[in-house]
Amino acid sequence: MKLDIVSVILDFNDRCGSPTAQITESASKLSWTSAYTLLKKVDTLPQGHASWKVEIFEVEGDLVDPETGKQLTETIELWMRDPVECVQELIGDPRFCKSIHFEPRREYADREGRCRVYRGMETADWWWTVQLKLPEGATVAPVIIASDKTNLSRMSGDKTGWPVYLTIGNIDKEERRRPSSRATLLLGYLPATKLGSCFSKAQQSIAINRVFHRCMSSMLRSLVKAGEEGVEMVCADGYVRRVFPILAAYIADHPEQCMVSGCKENFCPKCSVPPNERGEPGTHPLKKPDAIHTIYRRAWAGLQPPELDNLGLRPVEPFWVDLPHCDIFTAITPDILHQLHKGMFKDHLVSWCTEALGPGGEKEVDRRFKAMPKHAGIRHFKNGISGVSQWTGMEYKNMERVFLGVIAGACDENVTRAARAILDFIHYAHFETQDDSSLHRLHSAWQHYHRFKHAFVDLTIRQHFNFPKAHSMQHYERSIRQSGTADGFNTEQSERLHIDLTKIPYNASNKQDTYLKQMALWLERQEALERFKSYLEWRGIKPRTSHPRAPASATAAATKSADGRKDHNSRRVAKSPAFKKTLRELIDSHGTLQLLPAWYVFLRKVALGHPQRLKHINDILFHNGSWISGYHQFKLDLPIVRQVSAGVLVDTVHASPEHAAAHSGMSATPANMSTVLVLDPDLAPGISSPPFDPSNPLRGLQVARVRAIFNTPSIYNAALLGLQEPLAYVEWFTPLQVYDNPTGMYVVSHSTRQHLRNVSIIPISRIIRTCHLIPVFGKTMNPSWTSENVLDMCTRFYVNPYLRHHDFVLFRYLDPRHTDSLDT
């Protein structure tokens, strides 16, 4: 194929996908005359291993046609691809060569091997268990299936899609979670029919369950033989291995989990707990596939075994009974989005705590959310939370970051402790790397929730806790040890895939009866283009394009300029200062009222033990007319924390004053001045800080508020003074010494000296990260507090441990003071 055709094919997707692109024949100089001819060229590209096929079958209902006297039927279509071919495509993709595993391993956090570490499936127990059952030299491909219904119609219509996705546990979960990596393939579309045309309402539910299992049996049929005998596959590293694809994990929300396991929705899809005992912390064994299969065989024989009702089993033929080495009850994974964020937090905890505040609790909660200090990492609910009608996972997470501080002091202390336990459990469940220690903390948070949940019963808010989302929390620790950390199985990933693999293909169809066929064709062409593009990148061939692009050198230069100046501590400021003001103007605009005396105190520290510096300082007259240049912000890199991040997280420290409205009708922009954690504020510049102490990670840290970020005034010789980095004017809060046991948060106040705010000037390298302060609202909030003035008007603040997962690790997981505070 000629390179100009390749360029046209690669450009077609970008150009047609952009609503603003006005492509004309003279400007584009395309080598095709119509979309039809272009698509024909696309169809000549090599296809992947997994091709689409459709299976059509009829479902006979219980309703009778009054005219013919025969039972009504409905024809349904199952669009699918071969799962073994999908596994072959994923395990052999050279793009995953550096992020793929072919054998299990055990990792430990200590040299003695006492604290085991859990990450992906290769570090967990399931792979080890299955590996021992297979012949020597076998390679396990842990198949991960996800299914979830989604609406296709917008504004009007009732079209529904039911996609099924497939990936393998050999690929790192960080790679699987990125939609752009294409490490998850669309396995097929289940028929999303309600079967209302041939079944009565009483029988529709069980009929849908039977159709689901019949379709999944057809879709996964090839896994039976492949899981027993293995299939030779060319792997990403170029070696040929005998691969055994085995169903290892199934990702779904609670209704689909119950459908997959074959039980009713008021039963647990994993264990044998009775429905009336789900609210208590007792442990129950997981269901055994062989025992359940025996019960089903007796039911199919017409024996009506009592276990069918005792375990809440539906009369279906499960698709997983013939899959080798498959334990579906172990395979069902935790669902952080629906079970924790939407379930335990939003649907239950928020409403319980709001009611616990008493009459007017909803308005009081709204007032506190409105008055919450702003932070770039937290959404500010300027209208409260009661009026939000459409919630997403992002809103749930932003509420969780401040919710404990919102209710603290306004309700019973045990309510606060129960809320804290749930929030801690959610954050521990989010860890990307777990070990025995963090799993112990996860289990302890679950126990503390059960210990303090009686507060809601005492307040007549709840009568029992027999609902599935509360019970699901007890399975997290066991599931993580079995299959790896819960972040690798979150339904947020499948919901994000709906956009690329279901909604966009549906919008590309004519939305009529044959839309599934058109969606499959559209996806096949997109995958062919992507596959060919990856091949060209692997070969080092750059497609020739007709529209201008910036040269690589210019792009790199632009990126370097945008980064600005960077010091050895990874603090980055803009290449040019944002402002230049006199000392008097800086004091008036930024509120740095004690800048002049603080400056001389700072200079004395700089000159300590340096006679030449002291002489230079004494020769300079620094006054209100002296010019100072500065910045509105700087960026710093948070360290990599294995529990919560695989990469560097960028944090931004702001020190921007209030800006007047540009013109009438617009409101003024409020000041944005960050609160930060400062390391060893009493040390002089140039003196290194003591090493990090794991037994006391908060040692030497103090909270401050940044009022201004500025360079050393030009009248001074910065090189002589050793001041090569920008400086910050900060207002101090009291040390991290007062600890509030019910909330598990440190309490700080404004630090004063001689009835004035205690201030200092420090190098920005002393600032290690931003932090968030939550006002101690008390029983009722001061009505004059707003998000703009609360940091000045309030006297006491909680240091928020839920700002980011980094902060949770620092203030909760690593802080030894937190360990037993719930018991105090």
Image (spheres, helix red, strand yellow):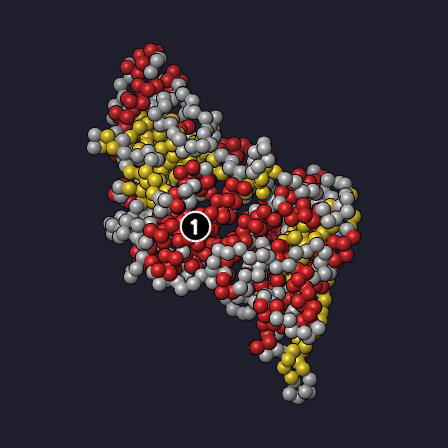
Give the amino acid type for the residue marked by disc 1 in the picture: His
> Residue 588: image x %, image y %?
26, 34
Please tell me whether residue 577 is drawn above or below residue 601 in the rendered image: below
Question: Residue at image x 65%, y 73%?
Answer: 304
> Residue 121: image x %, image y %?
63, 46
Q: To which residue does mark 1 refer?
A: 448
Question: Residue at image x 58%, y 63%?
Answer: 258
Along the viewing direction, whichever of 300 and 701 lies nearer the viewer: 300
Quadrant assignment for the C terminus: top left
Locate residue 603: give its quadrant: top left
Q: Residues within 10 Å of mark 1 (few under 14, many from 20)?
A: some
> Residue 79: image x %, image y %?
68, 63
Question: Residue at image x 67%, y 50%?
Answer: 142
Question: Residue at image x 62%, y 62%?
Answer: 260
> Residue 178: image x %, image y %?
58, 47
Question: On the rendered structure, is 262 left or right of 438?
Answer: right
Locate residue 804: give its quadrant: top left
Along the viewing direction, whichever of 739 and 214 lies nearer the viewer: 739
Q: Across the whole image, how many numbered discs are drawn on residues?
A: 1
Please tell me whether residue 174 is drawn above or below residue 638 in the rendered image: below
Please tell me whether residue 219 is drawn above or below residue 789 in the rendered image: below
Question: On the rendered structure, is 524 left or right of 160?
Answer: right
Q: Describe the element under mark 1 as helix, strand or loop.
A: helix
Locate residue 810: give its quadrant: top left
Along the viewing direction, whichever of 241 and 554 lies nearer the viewer: 241
